[in-house]
Amino acid sequence: MPDISVKICGLTAPDHVRAAAEAGARYLGFNFFLKSPRYVSPAQAAALMQAVPVGVAKVALVVNASDEELDSITGAAPFDMLQLHGSESVDRVREVKARYGLPVIKVIGVADAEDLAAIDEYGDVADQLLIDAKPPKNAVLPGGNGMAFDWRLLAGRKYWRKPWMLAGGLNPDNVAEAIRMTGARQVDVASGVESAPGVKDPALISAFIKAAQ
């Protein structure tokens, strides 16, 4: 079976950072969206990143962030990638890449087949894509809601022009099936490895990575 890369997102405690890295996560995500229960400040993220071993990618998750906000985040700690999780346009993705010189992951929310067109559109400019469940109307959070979408929409579509991750409602019990149905080679999880909103569970992190791989 091909190797599966796992991203554990929304880390807020040093012990959980270490647990994710030791369990085999390839990417660790730090959330800078103020309304999220997983929010960390740039200073907090800088401290947490001291527990990240060499070779594990450190990802800054932002939502419609201004240049000023991104300057603060990237100035505080040496991130490897930026994850744009809002309604950023193709032009904004291009601007962020040029300004910060970092690879960009663009999140695409999917609820039905019509939403798949954005995957090709953003694939022209983003370095990676993250295919997530589109949040319900009036949702506070753009992601991390524990919602899945119909994975059959992605069946047989594994050959997009850019690497992509599957997200949305994944947990240790369903991630293997999600990978089988979609052909995903990378998966992302936040709420699916938590004991409470924003509180990661090391046992669930380990179980998720084992199930994915």
Image (spheres, grey):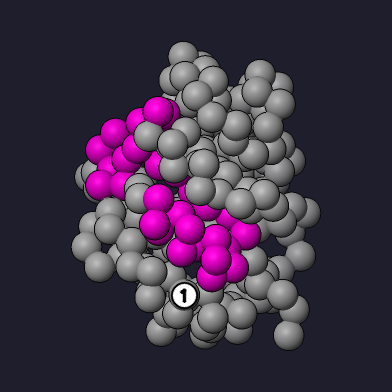
Residue 177 placement (x, y as % from top left): 52, 85
Can you say whether 26 is above or below 81 in the image? Answer: below
| Residue 3 visible in the snapshot | yes
Residue in the picture at 23% in, 57% down: 197
Can you say whether 108 is above or below 69 in the image? Answer: below
Residue in the picture at 54% in, 70% down: 23
Residue in the picture at 67% in, 49% down: 54
Q: Is residue 169 magenta?
A: no
Residue 169 placement (x, y as % from top left): 38, 68
Foreground residue, 95 or 176? 176
Q: What's the residue type where badge 1 is placed? A: Ser
Q: Is residue 27 magenta?
A: yes
Q: Which residue is mark 1?
A: 206
User: What is the span of residues highlighted in magenta in the rendered image?
Assistant: 14-43
Question: Which quarter of the picture shows residue 106?
Answer: top right
Residue in the picture at 72% in, 75% down: 3
Residue 108 placement (x, y as % from top left): 52, 50
Residue 16 placement (x, y as % from top left): 40, 58
Q: In the displayed image of the protein, which residue is found farthest to the top?
A: 68
Question: Which quarter of the picture shows residue 130?
Answer: bottom right
Q: Secondary structure at mark 1?
A: helix
Can you say whether 106 is above or below 178 in the image? Answer: above
Q: Seen in the image, is 36 located left or right of residue 159?
A: left
